[in-house]
């Protein structure tokens, strides 16, 4: 739901050549609260890109060894831990991945951008529509941008919110975080929905845990669609640790951010993932229509704008086509 250029406009001290950097600032090391458990994730496992790489995605004159895989990064470790958490609960409700090999792992001909995509559809009778995981890593003249996403969308058997996580790192010391239970109803028109999924679950406490970090500041997407689609409890922040703050950022990602993301996912698993909702035909039609608008706009605002800038046209076309298939969105 976020274009790379959206976040990069607001990332200070970035090394990317096409961004005007603002003056960096230093910050103290973030420490967990007394008694809090630091969620330390394993560093030993390399990022796994599903599927086999296709030689057709590489420049003909470039040997395989010259195309470096996406580097290990803290946010990918967080995403893997969330994937394991979700699959442990949802496995009986998910079908195996059917993503083609040349989409499960892809790269551009220049060798400076790699990505992966995995989509698992919900099993028949499940309220899960699909679970999508993706990662993009693109080198630019003076740095790199890394985008890690997990989406778990529900179908019309329930009106419960979807789960959304996007982590976008545009410099070694800062990251944009979007974490939300994406509402499927107008919250001002349905106060009972707001109470059930956002007030009773006390999910706003998780947002506060991130926003109280001294390194966090609100992130305001330039996309009005993104800003209108998320819930009032959404975590939308830039965590900026300033010059020399690489270690601080890693500590925050492994610690506070990982713990909050895990708790938000657990709330979603407990309150949304297995729910069913009695709806009449009119309510269900409205729900389906809203879902389709969100999905269509997500592809329009996000993928069709960002992927062609990172990858060759044939690669980006294949990836977008597979995501359209998962989203149930037709070509325009």
Image (spheres, grey):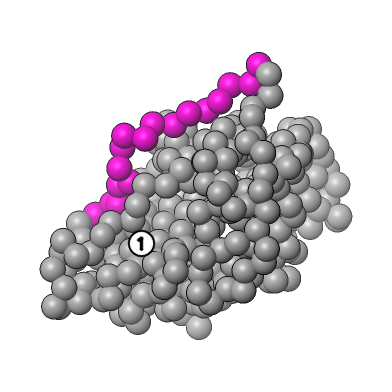
Visible residue check, residue 103: no
Task: Say above or below: 319 vs 77.
Answer: below
- Image spot of residue 4 (x, y percent): 54, 68
Residue occupying the far top of the picture = 35
Q: Would you call the spot at circle 1 few (<14 residues within 10 Å), some (14-19), or many (20 or more)?
A: many
The image quadrant that residue 285 belongs to is bottom right
Return the residue at label 1: 115
Q: Main secondary structure of the magenta part?
A: loop
Q: Residue at x 41, y 73 (%)?
A: 141
The image quadrant that residue 92 belongs to is top left
Visible residue check, residue 270: yes
* Segment colored magenta: 35-51
Q: Residue at x 48, y 58 (%)?
A: 147
Q: Secondary structure at mark 1?
A: strand
Left of 58 or right of it: where is 294? right
Q: Quadrant of the N terminus?
A: bottom right
Asked whether 24 or 16 is in front, the reply is: 24
- Image spot of residue 316 (x, y percent): 37, 75
Instruction: Indicate whether residue 14 is drawn in magenta.
Output: no
Asked whether 302 or 22 is in front, the reply is: 22
Q: Residue at x 79, y 57 (%)?
A: 186
Left of 65 or right of it: where is 183? right
């Amino acid at each position: 739901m976020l274009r790379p250029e959206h976040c990069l406009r607001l990332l200070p001290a970035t090394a990317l050549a096409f961004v005007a950097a603002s003056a960096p600032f230093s910050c103290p090391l973030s420490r967990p609260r007394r008694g809090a458990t630091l969620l330390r994730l394993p560093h030993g496992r390399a990022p796994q890109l599903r599927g086999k790489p296709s030689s057709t995605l590489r420049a003909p004159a470039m040997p395989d060894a010259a195309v470096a895989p996406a580097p290990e990064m803290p946010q990918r470790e967080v995403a893997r831990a969330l994937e394991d958490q979700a699959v442990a609960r949802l496995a009986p409700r998910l079908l195996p991945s059917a993503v083609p090999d040349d989409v499960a792992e892809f790269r551009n001909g220049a060798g400076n951008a790699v990505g992966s995509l995995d989509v698992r559809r919900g099993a028949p009778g499940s309220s899960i529509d699909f679970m999508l995981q993706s990662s993009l890593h693109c080198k630019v003249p003076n740095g790199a941008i890394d985008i890690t996403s997990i989406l778990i969308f529900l179908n019309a058997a329930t009106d419960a919110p979807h789960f959304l996580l996007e982590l976008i790192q545009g410099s070694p010391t800062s990251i944009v975080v979007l974490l939300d239970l994406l509402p499927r109803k107008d919250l001002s028109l349905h106060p009972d929905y707001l109470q059930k999924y956002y007030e009773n679950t006390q999910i706003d406490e998780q947002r506060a845990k991130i926003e109280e970090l001294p390194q966090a500041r609100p992130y305001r997407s330039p996309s009005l669609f993104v800003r209108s689609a998320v819930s009032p409890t959404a975590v939308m922040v830039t965590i900026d640790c300033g010059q020399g703050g690489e270690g601080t950022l890693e500590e925050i990602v492994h610690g506070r951010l990982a713990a909050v993301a895990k708790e938000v996912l657990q709330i979603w698993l407990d309150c949304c993932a297995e729910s069913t909702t009695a709806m009449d035909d009119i309510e269900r039609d409205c729900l389906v229509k809203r879902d389709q608008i969100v999905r269509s706009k997500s592809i329009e605002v996000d993928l069709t704008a960002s992927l062609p800038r990172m990858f060759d046209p044939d690669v980006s076309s294949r990836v977008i086509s597979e995501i359209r298939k998962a989203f149930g969105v037709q070509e325009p």
